[in-house]
Image (spheres, rainbow, N blue to C red):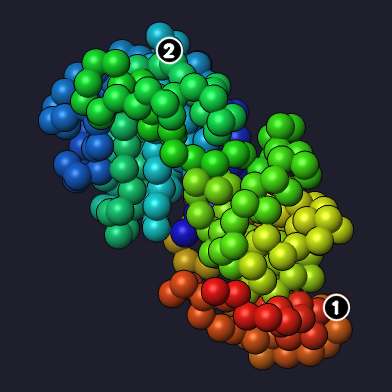
Amino acid sequence: MPELPEVETIARDLQRWVAGAVIVDARVAWDRTIRHPQPPERFVAEVAGATIRRVGRRAKTVLIHLEDGRVLTVALRMTGALIVAPPGAPPDPYARVVFALADGRELRYRDVRKFGRIGLWPGGGLRSVGSGRGTRSRRVAEGSPRYRIGEVFAGHGPEPLSRSFTVQRFAERLARRSARLKTLLLDQAFIAGMGNIYADEALWRARLHPLRAADTLSEEEVRRLHRAVRRVLREGIANRGSSFSDYVGADGEPGLNAERLAVYRRTEQPCHRCGRAIRRIVVGQRSTHFCPRCQPEPVASPR
Ligand SMILES: [Zn+2]
C-alpha cells in the first residue's frame, strides 16, 4: 500500500511530466473509482478541457491542481498507481480511469484491486487543514456546493515533513494520548501519510518498542522519534519508495527502498544494529516488526 514516500514520488514524477498538460477527454472503465462528482459521466464532462497547473500531495493522496483552481484527488489505497503512457502505448486492462492528454499521451489510473478513489473538487480551504485551524469547525456535507477540497482532508493530522511539524508540536500531541505508538503512527488523524512500513522503520530507528504508550515517552525519546519519522520518510522518497507488490512510480518502475528497510518484513533476519533476530507481532491487526534488543519492551504494559 503506497504511503507518503510512494505517493510523493508519484506526485513529483507527475509534476515533471504533466504540469501544463491539457486533459482533452477522460474515460471511466470502473464507475466506483469515481468518488465525486456523481455520476461518472458528470465527472468526465467536468474534467474535459482542464489544464493541469501542478501536482502535489496531501497525506497519501495525489493532488492534481487545475488552472481554474479545482483539484483532482487520487487516493491510491491498496494497489492504485498513476502512470504516464506515451502515445500509442498498448491498453492496460487494469486502467480504471484514463485521462487523454492533448499531446497524445495518457495519464492512466491503474488499480488491480479497485479500492482507490478519484474526486474532482472546488478549490479552497486546503492551507488551513492539519494546522488545527479552520475547516474542521465548519464542515459541510460532500455533494453540497460549499464542499471544497479543504473539507476532503478536514480530519487529517499534520504533515510530518512540513516545517510546522516541530518536536514541540509532536511532543504536545503525544503527551495527550495513551495509545500504543504503532497504533498512533498509523492513525491519519494523528499524523498524515504514515503506514505499516514507515511506522515500523521509524520505531526501530528511534529504538522505541511498538507497544509503548505515547504519553510515557521522555523528552529525549520524543526527539528521537520525531527525527526518525522524518528520516525514514525522506530516505523513502530519495529511494523512490518501497515496492513489495504493486507500487510503481509514474514511470511504471518499482522503487528501490524495500531492500534498504531495517525491520519491515525482515522477521528472523539479524538486526542491522545489534544482530538479534527481528521479531514480528500483531498490533491492532497489523503485522509489526521490531528488534527485541534495540527496542525494549515497556516496563508496565499499556491499557
Ligand atoms: Zn537490534
- Above or below 70: residue 274: below
In this rendered view, identify the residue nearer to me: 56 or 106.
56
- Quarter residue 213 falls in: bottom right
Please give the residue where the numbered disc 1 appears in the rendered image. 273
Q: Can residue 243 be seen in this view?
A: no
Residue plotted at (77% across, 42% down): 168
Against 203, residue 154 (above or below) is: above
Of pointers 2 and 1, the one earlier in the residue sequence: 2
Q: How busy is the neighbourhood of tag 1: few (under 14 within 10 Å), some, or many (20 plus)?
A: few
Amino acid type of the residue tagged 1 in the rendering: Arg
Residue 208: percent from left, percent from top = 74, 70
Q: What residue type is labelled 2?
A: Gly
Residue 82 at x, y = what percent?
Answer: 43, 42
Q: Which residue is drawn at 35% across and 27% down?
A: 139
Q: How many labels does the image show?
A: 2
Residue 197: image quadrant is bottom right
Residue 78 position, x and y percent, is 39, 58
262 left or right, relative to 129: right
Q: Between marks 2 and 1, how big is the CA–CA gap?
A: 48 Å
Circle 2 packing at 10 Å, graded few (<14), some (14-19), many (20+), is few
- What residue sits 81% from the left and 61% below the top? 218
Q: Can residue 82 be seen in this view?
A: yes
Q: In this view, does 231 lie above or below 264?
A: above
The reply to whether the residue tagged 1 has its Cβ within 8 angstroms of ligand 1 is yes
Label 2 element class: loop
Which residue is tagged 2? Answer: 69
Q: Which residue is drawn at 73% across and 82% down?
A: 299
- Left or right of 10 in this view: 23: left
Judging from the image, what secondary structure is the residue with disc 1 in?
loop
Q: Which of 303 and 211 is in front in this view?
A: 303
Rendered position, 87 above or below 67: below
